[in-house]
Amino acid sequence: MSVKAIAINPQNPSAFIELSLPMPEPGENDLLVEVKAVSINPVDTKIHAGIVKNGLKEPRILGWDASGIVKAVGAGVTEFKPGDEVWYAGDITRPGSNTTHQLIDARIVGHKPNTLDWASAAALPLTALTAWEGLFERLNIQDAGSDKTLLIIGGAGGVGSLAIPFAKHNSNVTVIATASREDSAQWCRDRGADQVVNYHDLKGELAKQGITFVDYIFILNDTDGHWNAVSELIAPQGHICTIVENEHPLDQNKLKSKSATLHWEFMYTRSMYQTADMARQGEILDAVAKLVDNGAVESSLSETLHGLSVESISEAHRKVLDGHMRGKVVVEF
């Protein structure tokens, strides 16, 4: 039995090609998953852009956000069995999810929420893990009192759409989100944001609310562009976490006088470095599944494309690159 996959074309790296590959065999800790849906994320387009710039010798399968059915398990796997419905964000060091069947380390896989269909489930793992790790493992907002404030820069995007309800359900902080359009602002309010401000003038907008400093800042877009405002807004002994790489040096001087802390969050760190706590990602996904099934968290799916094809994957990439997605685009097949 062969596997269908959509990969970057080494002869023309700006384009995708369809491949037919042998069915893979799971390693000791692997699951073989029949993929049902995959979400396209900025990491896909960033890796694609890097390949277009630097070239490629062999076809590369992208896609690291999926839902599907376990078809086979490795000898060391005890938490899953064939037939289980799962979701995961994957491992960027291995072939991705733009394929009918994929091998994935069982430790970074969770059981899919019962209340979500394939597309709605595929929209969540990468952003859920990023939001959860950023909030609760970098910023540790679960330890903060009700007098503390959290500013989420990019509240209506894929990560922000989950960071807002996570923060509301698992901490006592006041949640302030940024948005520039009224529909995006309402999206943030619908997910639990206590306040929404326009990111074009963060200091001025917060000053209108009587806020000079915020205790926690979660940067989900344009670290360079927001850095000056963030450096001034962060409270003494406050914490900043960003998921977006900087292109220019970040001036740390204002942080030094405040004894403020800068954290980086990269969801793939655990799988990339095979950390001792790698299985924590499976535990987080199971915890998120419970929040979803209890109605506390909604899927951030906003658009579904159908069929695994060069055309559908290309179109999904185009929509992400457009930069105006509210929520997530998913390809279901």
Image: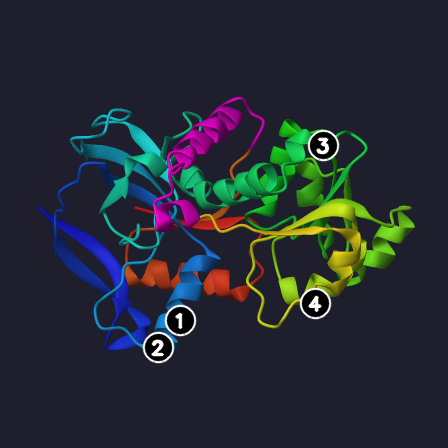
Instruction: Look at discs 1 and 3 and give the one toward the viewer.
Output: 3
Magenta run includes residue 79: no
Segment colored magenta: 269-297
Q: How far is disc 3 from disc 2 in space, using C-alphas?
A: 44 Å
Q: Amino acid at mark 1?
A: Gly
45 over 2 or under it: above or below? below
Measure the alpha-carbon separation of dots 4 and 2. Answer: 30 Å
State the separation of the CA atoms marked 3 and 4.
Answer: 27 Å
Where residue 76 appears, as percent x and y from the top left, is 20, 30
The residue tagged with tag 2: helix, strand or loop? Answer: helix
The residue at which mark 4 appears reads as: 251
Q: Report the residue at 81% width, 33% height from top.
A: 147
User: Which residue position holds label 2?
Assistant: 54
Pair 4/2: label in front: 4
Alpha carbon distance from label 1 to label 3: 39 Å
Is residue 232 shown left or right of residue 222?
right
Q: Residues within 10 Å of mark 4 (few under 14, many from 20)?
A: few
Q: Earlier in the sequence, mark 1 or mark 3?
A: 1
Give how far apart the Cα atoms at labels 1 and 2 are: 6 Å
Classify 289 as above or below 28. above
In this rendering, the answer to whether 246 lies above or below 161 is below
Residue at 60% of width from left, 40% of height from top?
135
Closest to the observer, 105 or 71: 105
Which residue matches tag 3? 144
User: Around disc 3, counting alpha carbons within 10 Å, would you say few (fewer than 14), some (14 to 19), or many (20 or more)?
Assistant: some
Task: Look at mark 1 in the image and give the residue it sits on.
Answer: 50
Kindly identify the amino acid type of the residue bearing the numbered disc 2: Asn
Circle 1 SS class: helix
Residue occupying the point 61% across, 58% down: 221
Q: Nearer the viewer, residue 132 or 140?
A: 140
Picture coordinates of residue 232 (x, y %)?
80, 58
What residue type is disc 4 on? Asp
